[in-house]
Image (spheres, helix red, strand yellow):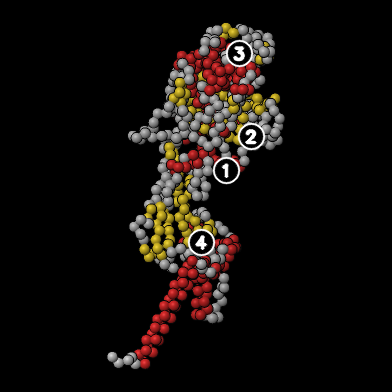
Amino acid sequence: MPAPMPDSRRVRAWTGGVLICVGALLSLTVLRVAHLKLLPPPELDSTLGSRTSTTRELASRGRILDRRGRVLATTTVGHKLFADPALIWERGWTRIREGMARDPEAVVSTDPFQEVSGALGQAIDMPAGAILERLRGKAESRYIVLDADLSDHELDGVRTLGLEGVGTEQKLVRHYPHAPIGSQLVGRTNIDQQGLSGMELMQERALAPATGKLTFLRDARRNALHIDDDAYVPPRPGQDVRLTIDLVIQEIAERRLAKAVSQYNAGGGRIVVVDPQTGDVLAMADILRRRSGWAEVTEDKDRAKDPALGRNRCVTDAYEPGSTFKPFVWATATELGIYDPSTRLPTPKDGPYRTAFGRAIRDVHYYGTVDWTTVLVKSLNSGMAMAGERMSVDQMRGAVVDRFGFGHRTGVGLPGEEEGLITPADKWTKWTQTSVAMGHEIGVTPVQMARAFSAFCTDGSIPALRLVLPQDSEGSPSSPPRTPVLPEPVALVAREAMERVLSEGTGRKAQSATYRMFGKSGTAQLPKPKGQGRGYYEDRYVSSFVAGAPLQNPRLVVLCVIDDPDRRKGHFGGSIAGPVVRDVMDESLNYLGVKPDQLEERRKGILATGQDLPENAAAPVETVLMLNEDDAAAEEVAR
C-alpha cells in the first residue's frame, strides 16, 4: 500500500487543530455563558430579570351585610397610575434623536421625564414637579406607582394622553355605603384589602379572596412564548358575611346615644341592643369625646386616625355597674330561699345600716322595715348588704358572678374582648361581699351586662351572644345555644319587680308611654385611672340603665352607659341613661312591628307628666298619674 502523501498529512493536522480550537472555543463559550448566568457582573445583573412573567387576576373581597341583606361593606373596582421610568427614558430619547435627525434645527426637549410629567400634571391632581421628582428618583426602575387612586375624570385624561411608559392598572377599593353608621363594628381594611379592625379583621378568613394568576415563559420583549397547562390558577372571591346587626336599629341607637352624650357633656357613651331570645346583637355603639378643660379618664389614640380603628369599649373596657347589678343578687337570694319577695327586712329608718363587721351602709332615703321586693324597687343598699351577709362567698362568687357570665368573655366575636374585673378569691373579704351585693368592687363589660340581663327576659336562660349569623345546611340561621341560670318563676318575679322600678323607683324618667318596660338604673363613682392615685373621684360618675320590653314577651334588651357626665347637667343613671334606653326601645320595637302593650291609664299619666319624651310621643292628655316628689333623690348613690 503506498504511503500517504505529505499534503494529506498536513490537511489532517490542520483539520485536527481547527477542531481542537473550535472545541475549545465552544467550551469557553459555554463556560462564559454559565458564568454570566450564575455570576453576572453588576451592569448586566439589573437587566437579566426573570424568564417568566406572572399576571394577576383580581378577585373581590366578600361583602359584609346586615341581617336584612343591606350592604355595609363591599368592593368596587378602581384604578391606579403607574410608570416605567426606564422605558420612558429609552423611548423618549429615541423620539428625540429621530426628531433631531428629521430637523436638526428644531428645538426639542432633552429630558423625556419632563415631557411626561408636564403632560400628566395636566391630567391628574398632582403637581408636575412632584411627578418629575419621583421619575428622576427612580430612573432605573421598571415600575412605580404615581397615583394609587385615580378618579374617573383623571382616568379618562391619562388614557387620552397615550403616553409610552405610563399606564393604568385596576385595583380593588373597599367601599362602605352607609358609613359612618356602624363603622366601628364593621371595621376597616388596609390598602391591600386586609382587615385591620372590627368584623373586617375578625372575619378575615371568610372575607379574603384568592387572587388568580397566570405564569408564562416570555422573551426579552415580554412576549409570551409558552404557557403550561397548569400555569393558570383561577381567582376565588371572598365569602359574604351576614351580621346580626340591623342597620336601622344601629342608626337609632347611635343617634340617640350621641344626643345624650352631647346633652350631658359626657366623656363618652356606650349602648348595646340585644335580642334576648336569640342572642343576636342588633346594635352596638361606642362614643368618646374630648372636652375642653377636662382631664379625660379614657383615651383611644387610634380613633384620631379613623374612628373605625379605635377599640370597641363595649367589649374592651369594664365599668362598675352599680345598682344595675342588684337584680342578679336579688334573684339569687330569692332562689336560694334567703328571702322571698314578701319577706320583711329591718332596713334603717333614720341612718346608715351597720353590718356585723361594723361597716356603715347608706341609702338615699331611709324607709324603715320594707319587704324584699321594695329593696329592689327602691334600690336600698342596706337591704342588699343584708342579703350579701347571709350569702356565702361561694354563693356570691359562683351563683351570682360566675353563673351569669361575669368574669368571662362572651365570645361575641370582636377583637380585644376582656373578661371584666373580679376580685380574686384569696383577696375576697367581708367588705367585698357587701360591696358586690350593691354592684361595687366589680367590673363588667356592656356586652356581659346585656347578655346576663337576658335571663329576666326568657325562661331564666341566657343565650350565647353573636354578631355573625351562621348558616345551616339549608341556608337558614341556626339556633344559638342557651345556658339556664335561673328557675323561670324567679326570673318572672324579678321581671315584675323591675317593672315597678320604672313606675315607683329610680327609673321613672325612663317610662315608655308605648311599651311596658322593666329595668334598673345604676350610678357608680368613676375610678381613678393609673397614675392619678387609688380609689374613686368624689364628683365623677358612670351612669347606666338596662331594660327589657315588652313585659310579657320581651323582644329587646337595651343597655346604655354614659361615661363621666358633667355633674352640673345630670349624672343619675335613671335620669340621663334611662331616657336613652326608652327612646331606643320605643323606636326599635315600633320598627320591628311589635304591638304596644302599655296600660292605657298609665300611658295617659306618663304623657301628662310632661317629662322628656321622644318626639313621636302623643300629646299630653288631661288624666295625670301622680309621681313621687323625690324622683331625682330616689336615685341610688355610689358608695
At label 3, the amino acid type is: Glu
Question: Cα distance, mark 1 to mark 3?
Answer: 48 Å
148 sits left or right of 635 in the view: left
- Residue receiving disc 1: 306
Residue at x-position 55% and y-position 15%:
330
At label 4, the amino acid type is: Tyr
Say if residue 249 shows up in the picture: no
User: Mark 4 or mark 2: which comes first in sequence?
Assistant: 4
Question: Cα distance, mark 4 to mark 2?
Answer: 45 Å
- Residue receiving disc 3: 389
At label 2, the amino acid type is: Thr
Whether the residues at callouts 2 and 1 have beta carbons within 8 Å, the answer is: no
* Crowd rating for badge 1 (residues with CA inside 10 Å; few <14, some 14–19, many 20+): few
Element on which disc 4 rests: loop
Q: Position of residue 358 (x, y in %)?
A: 68, 13
User: Mark 3 or mark 4: which comes first in sequence?
Assistant: 4
- Residue receiving disc 4: 143
